[in-house]
Amino acid sequence: MASRSGDSAITTKFGACLVDASTGRMLLGQWEDDLTISQLRRVLVEFRPVEVIYEKGQLSSRTVSCIRNLCQPRLATLSSEEWWGGARTGLEISKANYFGAVDVNSGEIVGWPQALRTCVELESNGDMALAAFGGSVYYLQKCLVDNQVVPLGQVHILPDVASQWSRTHGGHVSYARVVEPNARNLGGLESPVLEMDAAALQSL
């Protein structure tokens, strides 16, 4: 999950990628949270991740305590070299050719899931979600299961986030596929890994 200070002193921006390796489903989101990080709490309660991975030293102690208290997951960290930012994530995805490379002539992203393309197109409003996706992919590579999970292209946007993006950007993400967060149509996502990218986090 990505996190940095928001547009005011009492808000924090987060980005997250929830992964269910058993089904290949991945949910992306980026949002600006309030002082009590209420939306992060809702995500944690809704999906109950069994493992949370984030960049070493980049989550505040308050955020870590919140995660531990709400869902008691295993916590693991990646170094700054292992934790890709948004820009590097795009390069690594293209290099691995999970979905097809970027067209060198037109610069068009070919074959990528619409949710990822949305994150790229939204630039700073989607870069933290993209970075969280990159952290997820690196961890899947480390576990030697990335080629079984990522190329499936089952990448979607968290419903609440898709609604927020649509309002903020005038329907810009109306085409993104939204999956309702319930056990019936999320398969095994009741026990996902929540990838947490906290680059440039400032204490809440």
Image (cartoon, grey):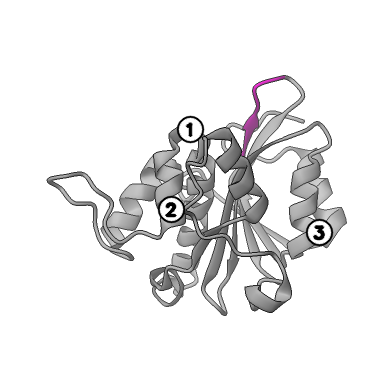
Looking at the rendered structure, the secondary structure element under dot 2 is helix
User: To which residue does mark 3 refer?
Assistant: 45
Q: Is residue 85 left or right of residue 74?
A: left
Dot 3 or dot 1: first in sequence order is 3
Query: Label 1: few (<14), some or many (≥20) within 10 Å?
Result: few
- Amino acid identity at mark 2: Leu
Start and end of the magenta stretch?
A: 1-8
Residue 124 numbered mark, or none: 1
Dot 1 or dot 2: first in sequence order is 2
Distance (Cα) linking label 2 and label 3: 25 Å
Query: Label 2: few (<14), some or many (≥20) within 10 Å?
Result: many
Nearer the observer, 46 or 159: 159
Distance (Cα) linking label 3 and label 1: 27 Å
- Amino acid identity at mark 3: Val
User: Residue 95 at x, y = what percent?
Assistant: 27, 57
- 14 is higher (above) or lower (below) than 76: above
Residue 116 numbered mark, or none: 2
| Picture mark count | 3
Residue drawn at 38 percent across, 41 percent down: 87
- Amino acid identity at mark 1: Ser
Looking at the rendered structure, the secondary structure element under dot 1 is helix
The image quadrant of residue 97 is: bottom left
